[in-house]
Image (spheres, rainbow, N blue to C red):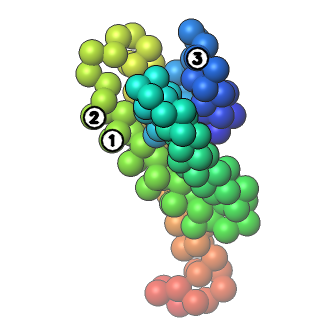
Amino acid sequence: MIILTLVNVILISFEADVSFPFSAFLPTMLTAVGQAGAAEGSSAWRIVGLILAAFPILIYAGCWILAKKYRVFLLIALILFVFDTLLLLLFSFGGGVSMWIDIVFHIWVLLSLFAGVKAWRKLSTLKEVAYGTGPTS
């Protein structure tokens, strides 16, 4: 998702006629808004859109890297992707088939992140019981 989002941001920046549906919505939307602002007049909008789009991509990448050691970043990624999905749903009406593919992809990512958070919680509970620090000890 992170890589395809980055690819989409680059494709939108170069005004390509193709994009991938398997990406986060917020960075692509921010890039598109920057492109639209640049088309209206000031090319600074393009730079602002790209800078703003970089933040969510970097946050997702950071969560992916840090979740390997600190499982709380799974929860952070889940919360951020819920926000991204809500934005997608807010702006998806009348988007056609590609929007439905994106919605299904977002649901799949949400379910995957939720399963990861659930497994993390279960692992934490098992560790508490094993080490005698949990409520059942």
Compared across the picture, whether 109 is left or right of 90 comes to: right
- Return the residue at label 1: 86
Nearer to me, 116 or 24: 24
Q: Could you tell me how far apart the alpha carbons at marks 1 and 3 are, in whole angstroms?
A: 26 Å
- Return the residue at label 2: 90
Q: For residue 101, what is the image quadrant?
A: top left
Identify the residue shown where x is 30% and y is 30%. Answer: 91
Of all residues, the one furthest to the front in this rendering is 41
Residue 116: tell me if it is visible. no
The three-letter code of the residue at mark 1 reads Leu
Query: Which callout, 2 or 3, points at the residue further toward the start of the chain?
Result: 3
Tell me if label 1 and label 2 are in contact, CB under 8 Å. Answer: yes
The three-letter code of the residue at mark 3 reads Glu
| Helix, strand or loop at mark 3 | loop
Compared across the picture, whether 13 is left or right of 76 comes to: right
| Helix, strand or loop at mark 2 | helix
